[in-house]
Structure formats: structure tokens, C-alpha cells
């Protein structure tokens, strides 16, 4: 007898729980209970323009779409506009024109709603120096109203993974750059955001911590989260990310699926040099 394809196979208890959680996540993001099949971007940027006062520098007409599950690399030369873009999305910088939506919510109309869904880690981990590591993490967990048992579990898990648990009782002022970076990453994960914005997250991390961060990024996006991060480490971006955008002087020059952008056998580094028009300059300088 041919198999019955008209009915769904029965789910085991774990799968059923997972399916329920996924439906809940999508419902929360869309804000439309029951409308679980609606397609929604985790981050939508449309025609974003932000120029600094009295300057031509900034971002011009940038449009990007990031979906749940995407690990999206944002690359560009020094001063291209990556940090500016990330700060606009995080709600730290205002912008001139355009739209930014997080999980379908407009950042100007519902900035609190957007901020509850995202976490931003700046390129320079500015963590309060007069707090201990654990006080800082509890402060962030308090802001996002993370229940005590969940925060203990997450701080324990990520603190142990980054081997920073024994130092959490020390003042942040005694931390190295890499330790502050680890603390900032844990603080971003403690409230389970749906969108992670990371500005050059691998800078200052030792090799083991970089491997752990990459594993965390993959698992975060595997669970339906999305990551938009800037980096100059192109080989990491090439291996880690399914999407990429390249900007030059505040303007998008290419974006899309990593595989398509790479094309046939090209490396991200060579594509980057090509599309930003820097390949010839380097050859000339070396010669
Ligand atoms: N506060 C500011 N006032 C004026 N201009 C600024 C300000 N911050 C940044 N800029 C300018 O805006 C442009 C984009 O800067 P941004 O920091 O976004 O670049 P970036 O791509 O993050 O560079 P990097 O790779 O060096 O971190 C640069 O030309 C920079 O000089
Ligand atoms: Mg920057």
C-alpha cells in the first residue's frame, strides 16, 4: 500500500515541544497570534540614510533584509559606515531618512519593543568598570526581567564556556580587553534576544573564545535567531555566514546569499577587493 501522505506524522514529546516553541517565537515576532505562517524579516532596513552633521560621511540609501536563521556578515573598509549602521539599528543613533524594522516593528514607532528583541555589542566593550562581572550581568538581566533561575542557568553556561566564571566576582576594571568582550557577549545572550548585532566581535578574543563564539552564533541562528555583524576577518565570514553585504563609502555595493556573492571558486577576500575597486590599487602599490 502506498504511504499516506495526507496526514502529518505524529510528533514525539520533544518534537511537539520544539514545534510549539517555534510557533510561539514566530507569533511573538509577528505580533499576530495564529498567523504563524506569515513571512517576516527579523531585520528590515529600507533606504537608510544617515549623514553626520556638517559632513558628507555616513550611510546613503542602504537597504537590507535579514531573516530568522541568517548569519549575516557586514563588511567594508575602515570608515565605510558599518558601525554607523549598527548604531542606527540599535537605536543609539538617529537617522535622516529610511525605515528600520526589527521583527516587523518600526524602530521609530516602537523603539522599546525593538530593543526588547535585540542585543547590541559595540566594537569597544564599554562595560561599567565599578561593577563586578556578576553585578553587571545581573543588572542587564534585571533590565530585561530575566527570572532568577534562567539567568543563573545562562550565566553559568556561557560563563563556563568562555572560562570567565571564576572572575565574575572581580571588578570589571581589573578585566583584560578580551574578558570585557566575553562579559559583553554573555550580557547580550542573557535575555535571549532574537536579533544579535555585533560590531567586530572577534577582535580581542583568544582563539578558543573565537571558536566558542562561532559555535554560539551557529546555535543561536539554528534556533531561529538572526545575527548581523561587522567584521574584517573575511575568511571567518566566508565560512560562518550564509549572507553577506559589502559597503563602500556608505553605499551598498553588493549583498545576498554568500554562495551567490562568491560565485565560482572565488574567495570573499578577492570579491571584496574586486567590488570595492581596491585590487588594482594594491597591485600598483606593490609594484
Ligand atoms: N561622530 C561622528 N561624527 C562625524 N563623522 C563620523 C562620526 N562617527 C563616524 N563618522 C564618520 O562616518 C564614517 C563611517 O564611520 P563608521 O564608524 O561607521 O565606519 P566603520 O565602517 O565602522 O569603520 P571601521 O572599520 O574603522 O570600524 C567615517 O568616515 C567616519 O569618519
Ligand atoms: Mg566600526
Image (cartoon, rainbow, N blue to C red):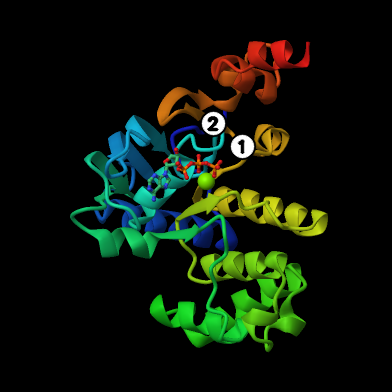
Which label was assigned to residue 244?
Answer: 2
Residue at 67 percent of width and 32 percent of height: 238
Q: 10 Å neighbourhood of mark 2: few (<14), some, or many (≥20)?
A: many
Q: 10 Å neighbourhood of mark 1: few (<14), some, or many (≥20)?
A: many
Q: Where is residue 179? Give x, y as percent.
A: 70, 70
Which label was assigned to residue 241?
Answer: 1
Q: Secondary structure at mark 1?
A: loop
Q: Is residue 25 among the parts visible in the rendering?
A: yes
**Mark 1 Cβ and ligand 1 under 8 Å apart:** no
Q: Please state if 208 lies on the left or on the right of 128 as rendered.
A: right
Check the image and report above or below for 36 versus 165.
above
**Mark 2 Cβ and ligand 1 under 8 Å apart:** no
Check the image and report above or below for 171 versus 74.
below
Q: Quadrant of residue 91?
A: bottom left
Position of the N terminus, as image quadrant, is top right
Check the image and report above or below for 172 versus 198.
below
Residue at 66 percent of width and 24 percent of height: 268
Residue lying furthest left: 109
Amino acid at each position: 500500500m502506498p504511504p499516506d501522505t495526507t496526514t502529518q506524522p505524529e510528533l514525539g514529546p520533544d518534537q511537539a515541544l520544539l514545534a510549539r516553541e517555534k510557533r510561539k517565537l514566530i507569533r511573538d515576532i509577528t505580533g499576530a497570534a495564529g498567523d504563524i505562517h506569515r513571512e517576516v524579516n527579523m531585520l528590515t532596513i529600507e533606504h537608510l540614510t544617515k549623514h553626520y552633521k556638517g559632513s558628507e560621511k555616513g550611510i546613503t540609501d542602504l537597504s537590507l533584509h535579514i531573516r530568522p536563521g541568517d548569519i549575516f556578515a557586514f563588511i567594508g573598509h575602515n570608515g565605510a559606515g558599518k558601525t554607523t549602521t549598527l548604531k542606527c539599528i540599535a537605536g543609539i543613533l538617529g537617522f535622516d531618512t529610511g525605515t528600520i524594522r526589527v521583527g516587523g516593528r518600526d524602530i521609530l514607532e516602537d523603539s522599546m519593543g525593538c530593543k526588547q528583541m535585540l542585543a547590541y555589542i559595540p566594537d569597544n566593550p564599554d562595560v561599567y568598570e565599578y561593577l563586578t562581572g556578576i553585578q553587571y550581568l545581573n543588572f542587564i538581566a534585571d533590565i530585561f526581567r530575566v527570572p532568577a533561575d534562567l539567568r543563573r542557568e545562562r550565566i553559568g553556561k556561557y560563563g563556563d564556556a568562555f572560562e570567565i566564571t571564576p572572575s565574575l566576582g572581580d571588578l570589571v576594571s581589573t578585566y583584560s580587553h578580551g574578558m570585557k568582550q566575553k562579559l559583553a557577549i554573555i550580557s547580550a545572550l542573557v535575555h535571549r534576544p532574537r536579533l544579535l548585532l555585533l560590531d567586530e566581535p572577534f577582535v580581542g578574543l583568544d582563539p578558543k573564545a573565537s571558536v566558542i563564539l562561532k559555535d554560539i552564533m551557529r546555535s543561536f541562528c539554528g534556533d531561529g535567531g538572526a545575527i548581523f555583524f561587522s567584521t574584517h576577518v573575511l575568511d571567518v565570514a566566508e565560512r560562518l555566514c550564509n549572507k553577506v553585504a559589502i559597503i563602500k563609502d556608505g553605499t551598498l555595493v553588493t549583498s545576498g546569499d554568500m554562495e551567490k556573492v562568491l560565485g565560482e571558486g572565488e574567495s570573499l577576500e578577492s570579491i571584496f577587493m574586486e567590488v570595492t575597486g581596491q585590487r588594482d590599487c594594491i597591485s600598483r602599490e606593490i609594484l
